[in-house]
Image: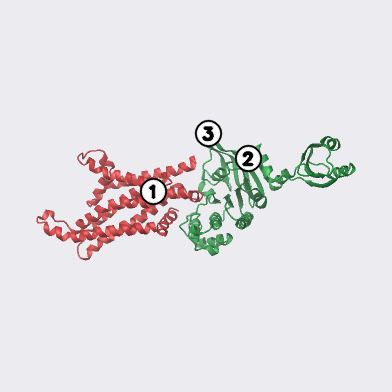
Amino acid sequence: MIINIASKEIKSFFVTPMGWIILALITAAFGTYYLEGVNSYFEVMSGAIRPAERVGVTIYVGQTVYGAAFFLMLFAVPLMSMRLISEERRQQTLPFLFSAPVSIVEIVLGKFFGLFAFLALMVVYIFLMLSTLNIWADVDFGYLFSNTFGLLLLVGSFAAIGIYFSSLTSQPIIAAILSFIFAFLLLGLESYFASQPNHWFHHVSLLKHFQTFSRGVISSKDIIYFLLFISTFIVLTIRRLDADRLRG
Amino acid sequence: MATTLKALGLTRLFGPNKAVNNVSFELSKGEVLGFLGPNGAGKSTTMRMLTGNLAPTEGQVEICGVNIIEEPKLAKANIGYLPEMRPLYKEFRVNEFLRIAAKLHNIPAKKINSSIDIAMEKCGLTHMSNRLIENLSNGYQQRVGIAQAIIHNPEIVILDEPTVGLDPIQIREIRKLIKEIGKEHSVILSTHILPEVEIVCDRVQIIDKGNLVFHGSIDDLKQQRRGNKLLVGFKKTPTLKKLQSLFDIVKIEKQEDLLHVIQFKNLDFDMEKFIQVCVKEKLGLFQVSPHITSLEDTFVQLTNK
């Protein structure tokens, strides 16, 4: 049943221009960063005289692309997630789902995984793009895997924030703005606390936990953080929808 | 006949306001139940509770013997619901949308195509199958709404004001469709169009300010309308006193021209005797007919109690 709802969401991304436009923009943006990385690699490396300054092509191009990824996704995910529930509220289509033999947990998970599958498509696409380096260089796939995995968890967290804010309002644009601000705070406040390495904010900052993956390290601590983060917002969304039924 | 739906003491509070107060009723298989009431009487709230869209503050709903609060999935599988605001994903085509509905209602993959075809045929949508729902007229969108509610062949179909905003021809077609659905399924239909109830429904239920004020068959309602009144035309109008000396009359009301409405004390007054006496007294009797209060009047009487 979760799959049915997820496939409905994926379909509705693609029957409207929204899905295609976002996909096109994201593709263009990542393509540009990738090209930029490849083009500047030899320039920068020929200027680097000391061996310590030299890095492999995977890390160099990877850093350019994945460094931009979380920033681009920060904009893309709220735009994709904003309609998930708020549009149903606005069009009053929620009774369609509520009267079907489906539980609210399944509805929310279905919607989340529908969005996540769409986002995962982009993440996998980035991975494939970077893998093409393998044609003329030796790509460090371990590094790519860890970045891909980290990015998946990051967009999953964005999606969870997005679906929660989408469940709060019947105005998709408000949902988009709120989830953007919230995700932005969790990423952007990082720089204010850079001078205090032991500050509590580092424990909740999405960026801090994502950085481990971007260094090529897969640590269970960060995986658990992201999974907890995602499930918290999914549970909050389920509770919000259940309140519709209880409070009316 | 088998009971398909049972509502027991349904009550719903919105803050301090009682939207629905202690409403109980049953529905049998193959029955069309009309749910009448003025705006804001609690019709939609009751329907939302019956379909599991709203939790009742008190009371129980049983769908084919399954409690909807305890086992919502099992109960909901037997309900088809069309809310007042039809829940259509307008960016999809008719057949795509019905496919989503079919999948959500757990129709086995092999049967999906055939059930979509049957639902479209029943609702006269076959030639609109590839149209975007957004581009359909109001009446056709409503049909998609009904098709969505009957696609899984549910025991109970609940329609909230299905004919609102349609043109007379569409209304007639939708009513025909509802009657047809009513043969195989139980149907609950809410409306505030009174003649609709007489045409479509077997049983009527009138709700006002959250309370059930009338519950019975269409014939009961008609009985209530016929009552103990006669519309009589006299050329020489007698006084009330004179009439009262002849018959058991409560009241006489002057209508237009020479017509009068006479209200008898008892329901089973003797019409033949009345005419005989009138002729004997030479009152110039030229017209006698039962005075039927309009359904509107009955409705107003019932809801103003």
**Separation (CA) of disc 2 from disc 1:** 42 Å
Count neighbours of disc 3 (C-alpha within 10 A) and say few if under 14, some if 14 to 19, many if 20 or more. Answer: few
Q: Chain of mark 3?
A: B
Q: In green, which chain?
A: B
Tell which residue pokes out farthest to the left in this image.
Answer: A49
- Check whether the beta carbons of the residues at disc 3 and disc 2 lie within 8 A of each other: no
Point out the residue furthest to the front here.
B257
Counting from the top left corner in percent of width and height, residue A49 is at 9, 56
Kind of residue at disc 3: Pro
- Residue that label 2 marks: B212
Label 3, label 2: how far apart the Cα atoms are: 20 Å
Say which residue label 1 marks. Answer: A173
Disc 2, disc 1: CB below 8 Å?
A: no
Q: CA distance from mark 1 to mark 3?
A: 33 Å
Q: Amino acid at mark 2?
A: Leu
The picture quadrant where one finds residue B170 is bottom right
Label disc, if present, on residue B16 of the rendered structure: 3
Q: Which mark's residue is nearer the viewer, 1 or 3?
A: 1
Q: Mark 2, chain letter?
A: B
Instruction: Tell which subunit mark 1 falls on.
Output: A
Give the residue type at disc 1. Ile
Whether discs 1 and 3 lie on one chain: the answer is no
Q: Secondary structure at mark 3?
A: loop
- The tag on residue B25 is none
